[in-house]
Image: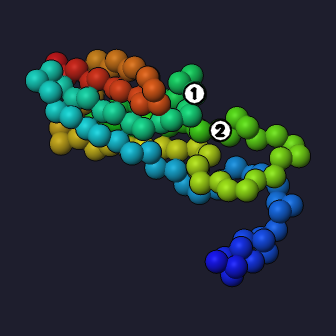
Amino acid sequence: MPDRDRRFSMLPMDRQVRPSGRLWNPAADVYRTSEGWIVKLDLAGVCLDELEIEVVDSNLRVRGCRRDTFYQEGYTYHQMEITYSRFEKSIQFPCSIHGASLARDYHDGLLVIKLRCE
């Protein structure tokens, strides 16, 4: 146990907080319904006003950015695991969804997109 404490104390404590540069690929679930499709994306911490949703042929593309709202000058971090960055999620469907009506709902960090195909 003393070795673990010693290694931990050797970590620099004067690091500045920087948003993560890693690419973020949010998880998605896709459901087939009798009227079309339902897509559910895990977008905790994303502002709904910053989302872009685009339908082209058989592809649904959702773009946005998750920002660190606690990021301030003078903060140092101890541990950061959440990715803060722009993202783009593309979902390929087995058929064209071009012209489908689109409804969206955002609740508890989940974006639900309903695509109703004619």
- Answer yes or no: do the residues labelled 1 and 2 have beta carbons within 8 Å? yes
Q: Which type of secondary structure does the marked residue at label 2 adopt?
A: loop
Q: Which image quadrant: the N terminus?
A: bottom right
Quadrant containing the C terminus in the rendered view: top left
Instruction: Work out how far the residue at label 1 is from the one at label 2, CA to CA, in angstroms.
Output: 9 Å
Residue under circle 1?
47
Closest to the observer, 111 or 35: 111
Viewer-proximal residue among 27 and 2: 2
Res 77 label? none
- Could you tell whether 8 is left or right of 34 in the image? right
Residue at horizontal 25%, vertical 38%? 30
Where is residue 91 drawn, in percent x and y? 32, 43
Q: Residue at x 41, y 29 (%)?
A: 111
In the image, is residue 72 above or below residue 54? below
Image point 51% across, 35% down: which residue?
A: 44
Disc 1, SS: loop
Give me the residue at 22% from left, 29% from top. Answer: 37
Q: Of label 1 and label 2, which has the lower sequence position?
A: 1
Q: Is residue 56 visible?
A: no
- Tell me which corner region of the image, top left, top right, bottom left or bottom right, holds residue 12: bottom right
Give the percent coordinates (x, y) of residue 14. 86, 61
Q: Give whichever of 95, 2 is nearer the camera.
A: 2
Residue type of the residue flagged with mark 2: Arg
The picture places residue 45, in percent across and down from the top left corner, at 56, 34
Q: Pick whichever, 11 or 34, lies toward us.
A: 11
Q: Which residue is mark 2?
A: 67
Q: Is residue 69 above or below residue 11?
A: above
Mark 1 surroundings: few (<14), some (14-19) or many (≥20) residues within 10 A: some
Mark 2 crowdedness (10 Å alpha carbons): few <14, some 14-19, many ≥20: some
Residue at the extreme bottom of the image, as rendered: 3
**Kind of residue sitting beneath label 1:** Cys
